[in-house]
Amino acid sequence: MFAIDTNILVYAHNKDSSYNKKASAFLEKAMNERNDEGILSICIPTQVLMEFINVITRQNVEKPLSLSNAIEIVKEYIKTGITIINHRETQIQTFLDLLSSMTTRKKVFDVALAATLKDNNIKGLYTVNVTDFKDYDFLEVKNPL
């Protein structure tokens, strides 16, 4: 299973983004691909949904969404039945273990996301920022755009 990163959601819902059409098409395709048991091949971590609301409502986005619109989008994703990945009890220890190999605090939220994926045995991540996750040998990272 692959997780969706924040940037894919932001591009798909930011109509002024040059990546909008590609991200929207990718998400539409991914949201319609299910395995034999009817389960989607993608999931979304709770951290990504929170980051999405934060980013898509910022004033530095070309046309930011209102908070209520962003909340509705997240609710719609939840209604689809997509697997939502949550932190596990081991999150802080996994996070600290991964962070201890870093030399800068700039990737703290990427490390937190990687820890969530690792603890939930998620093997892949779709993101535009592939290089941000190159150090995690437990993850297959792909840019779908």
Image (spheres, rainbow, N blue to C red):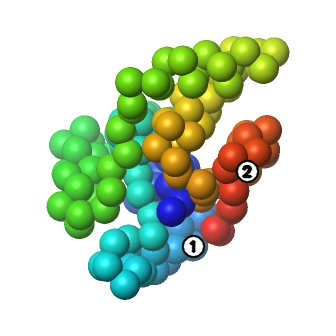
Q: Residue 105, position in %: x, y? A: 69, 15
Q: Is residue 114 above or below residue 8?
A: above
Q: Amino acid at mark 1?
A: Lys
Residue 101 in sight from this viewpoint: yes
Which residue corresponds to mark 1?
Answer: 22
Q: Is residue 36 above or below residue 79?
A: below
Q: Residue 90, position in %: x, y? A: 46, 24
Question: Callout 1: helix, strand or loop?
Answer: helix
Which residue corresponds to mark 2?
Answer: 130
**Residue drawn 39% across and 32% down?**
87
Mark 1: give few (<14), some (14-19) or many (20+) Cα within 10 Å: some
Looking at the picture, tell me which residue is in the foreground, 16 or 114.
Answer: 114
**Residue drawn 50% across and 55% down?**
4
Looking at the image, residue 88 sits to the left or right of residue 127; the answer is left
Q: Amino acid at mark 2?
A: Val
Residue 141's quadrant in the figure? bottom right
